[in-house]
Image: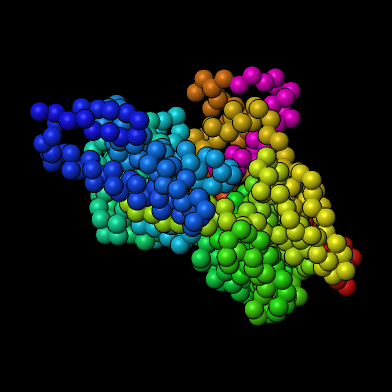
Amino acid sequence: MVEKWRAGNSAVLKPREETVNDRRKLRKFQITVLVLFQIMLMLGYVRAFDNGARTREAIKLIASAYYEIAQYGSGVPPEELVYAGIDGMMSTLDPHTHFLNPSIFKYMREEQEGSFFGIGISFDVRDGVLTVISTIEGTPAERAGIRAGDRILAIEGESAAGISTTEVLQKLRGEKGSRVNISVAGPFSDETREIELIRDLIPLKSVPYALMVSPETGYIRITTFATTTAEELAEAMHSLEKQGMERLILDLRNNSGGLLNAAIDVSCAFFQEDLNVVFTKGRTQGTNVDYRCQDAGRWTKLPVIVAVNMGSASASEIVAGAIQDHRRGLVIGDTTFGKGLVESLYPLDEGCALQITTAQYFTASGRFIQKPYDIPHRHSQAEPRAVNGDLAIPSEDGGIVPDVIIEDPELPETLLVLSQTFFDFALRFNTDHPDAPTPSVTDQALFDEFLVFLDEKDIPYDVTDEDLTLLRERIMQSLVSNIVTVREGSDAAYRVQLQFQPLIQTALALFDDLPQMTGKQ
């Protein structure tokens, strides 16, 4: 006995007897409808009394389509169908609105909270081989004797050959106290070591580098804006003050942003009480907000130069824009990315979340720095506001335009090809010369040894001897930096790298003219 069961405009034949699988599918179907309805509520598509009927019809259409695909599709798991459907809805909005599946949402929360549980390595997948670049001091990996250049060949008995970065994170991170077994081989040995590691807390520093680049100049790098960033900044500043810091280079290059409140807290460390940092305008209740410093910052008189580039976005642009608008310091580098939107997170069931654009943010002077794209409701509706008697006009191309332009140097194609060999050469050099002092960038013998290494490894590079000589300085800087990485770790190598950067040298020279350029005598 059969009956006709209708879903939307389709008709299918279905046995009358309900099986366990039928009930499970029905439950999945009901959950899907509830989730989709919740999404529509949050996106503002449900309006009481006016378009409720249209919304109900839309939900019915989505639900019937889901049921047909789940019943007679290609066996795709239900969650994948739902994820794809939500992705499709989000794609109709602006490019910065996203659906976050459980793994992506988990990693985002770890980044924002500033820690996770893992083994404590910095890694790269080089030619399909999971390679340790460095270990974090005091972590399970460092205590187990894992070193730079070690190759992780297997994780929990499964080969790591060709593994992706996402898969590495999924396999090596886990719950505190949980165990993970890995097979490790040295950089030049096929002999493997079986190591059992117990996952522990691994701090994600948003302020990884704080050091002195001259007797009176401190340098701080902020890589993201998380819940711990303001606290990390204060700790770094106090440390540099003890070392004689009288002025600061704040490096926000390649910082893609993070939490709005963290950006405000960082900005207010350098501003007086009640100074406006940024304001937001949105379409929903509570999104029109003027953010001001609640208290006077600790470093309101310290000369500051902020470094930015095309990789500086969102929260980074808030800080740079505030410094620039209030003439608190100089912004140098390249024009920033141009992302002036506030994203709000809406957690869903099953560990998922929606990241939805809910507002636009404007710098203190009213600059809307979002780079244009063809969505009409994203155009700026705010008028520029006067700050310190001046009126800042938004750039047509978006982004924060630095006071002093220093473009990121382009890497020659040959150098990009050779860059894959620098770390491997550094491993070989330190194996062959374990007691030799760290070479200098003028060491001709090091350069010659590198060329021999390229020939022995049969690494092709299409470049004349003359061109290679022109690249010599850049190659030597990279070789020395990688040798220091292997010997002393990434922190020591970063200090070496800063010495080679034209932007840092320019910043040091600009401090003498800072009062005249900012109007602060």
Classify 71 as above or below 217. Answer: above
Camera-nearest residue between 287 and 208: 287
282 on left or right of 519: left
Residue 352, horizontal then vertical, whole percent:
39, 51
Classify 468 as above or below 311. Answer: above
Residue 15 in which image quadrant: top left
| Residue 267 in sight from this viewpoint | no
141 on left or right of 114: left
Specify whether residue 472 is painted magenta.
yes
Residue 249 in which image quadrant: bottom right
Residue 198 in which image quadrant: bottom left
513 on left or right of 78: right
Q: Which residues are magenta?
A: 461-482
Q: Residue at 59% across / 29% down in the picture?
A: 418
Q: Residue at 47% across / 38% down in the picture?
A: 88
Specify whether residue 253 is painted magenta.
no
